[in-house]
Image (cartoon, rainbow, N blue to C red):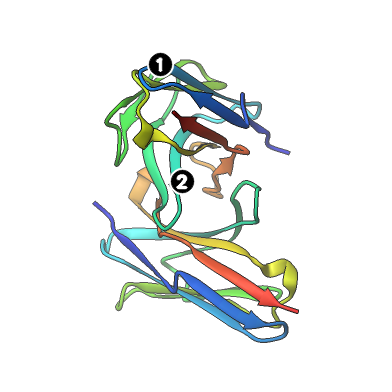
Amino acid sequence: GENVEQHPSTLSVQEGDSAVIKCTYSDSASNYFPWYKQELGKRPQLIIDIRSNVGEKKDQRIAVTLNKTAKHFSLHITETQPEDSAVYFCAASIGGSYIPTFGRGTSLIVHP
Amino acid sequence: DVKVTQSSRYLVKRTGEKVFLECVQDMDHENMFWYRQDPGLGLRLIYFSYDVKMKEKGDIPEGYSVSREKKERFSLILESASTNQTSMYLCASRKQGAITHEAFFGQGTRLTVV
């Protein structure tokens, strides 16, 4: 089955810095890559996703890039703010089932 | 707004008890999932259901079973709870075939088995 590796497990940045979280996947058939944000004590929520026919997608301060050849995708957060502090999960899914396999998560801490 | 509601926020059960975790969604979603969340291990899929009365094993189904008798409700059952099942359990639902494949999560049930 699909295997998703996520790095780093913890990321600490100063407010205003950029943050990058990287994921790799194993199955070249994967074609949908969502990112979820889980604030402390809250449920995970989708923040951005990308499909395999697109190389990059942006939404205000967040962006996701996908390299199908290398089988990796990344989340980029610019001008980080304390409210960006959360656990971020990447995921990958295959074909019509679209059952996502999640990475282990990255705890992002933004220091004021 | 999609609402996915789990019946309990916190549960404490004894070893050997049969435990029921309930999840209800109000948006007529076909797909429902049960995940287990442990520090450093991320979200691991226990069981999922494509639609009513359907169920499929996920990555870690051992010690668990599920029930989907109605479209809006997906129950996770721990047949005989053990201490290694102490964890956060998250339910999710998703519209089959939607343009967006977003999964909507419940607030989680933190289960402690003593």
Q: Which mark is residue B107?
A: none
Please state the chain letter of the residue tagged with numbered disc 2 in the rendered image: B
Task: Measure how far apart labels 2 and 1 are at the Cα level.
Answer: 21 Å
User: Please, what secondary structure does the residue beneath circle 2 have?
Assistant: strand
Query: Which residue is rendered at x = 28% and y = 55% of the image?
Result: A2
> Which residue lies at the image location 26% right of the left edge and 61% below the top edge?
A27
Depth check, mark 2 against mark 1: the one in front is 1
Query: Who comes first in sequence, dot 2 or dot 1?
Result: 1
Q: Is residue A99 visible?
A: no
In the displayed orientation, state which residue is furthest to the left: A1
Question: Quarter-wise, where is residue A66 in the image?
Answer: bottom left
Q: Label 1: state its secondary structure.
A: loop
In the drawing, does residue B32 fall left or right of residue A30? Answer: right
Q: Furthest-top residue in view?
A: B69
**Quarter of the image with the C terminus of chain B in it:** top left
In the picture of the structure, the residue carrying the numbered disc 2 is B37
x and y, in percent, of residue A77 in the image: 62, 77
Residue B74 lies left or right of residue A27; in this view the side is right
Chain letter, disc 1 residue: B
Above or below A2: residue B1: above
Q: Residue B91 location in percent, x, y?
A: 52, 35
Whether residue A13 sits left or right of residue B19 in the image: it is right
Residue beneath disc 1: B17
> Residue A43 location in percent, x, y?
62, 46
Q: Callout 2, which amino acid?
A: Gln
Q: How many marks?
A: 2
Residue A92, relative to residue B110: is it above or below? Answer: below
The answer to which image quadrant residue B51 occupies is: top left
Quarter of the image for the N terminus of chain B: give it. Answer: top right
Instruction: Look at label 1 and name its amino acid.
Output: Glu
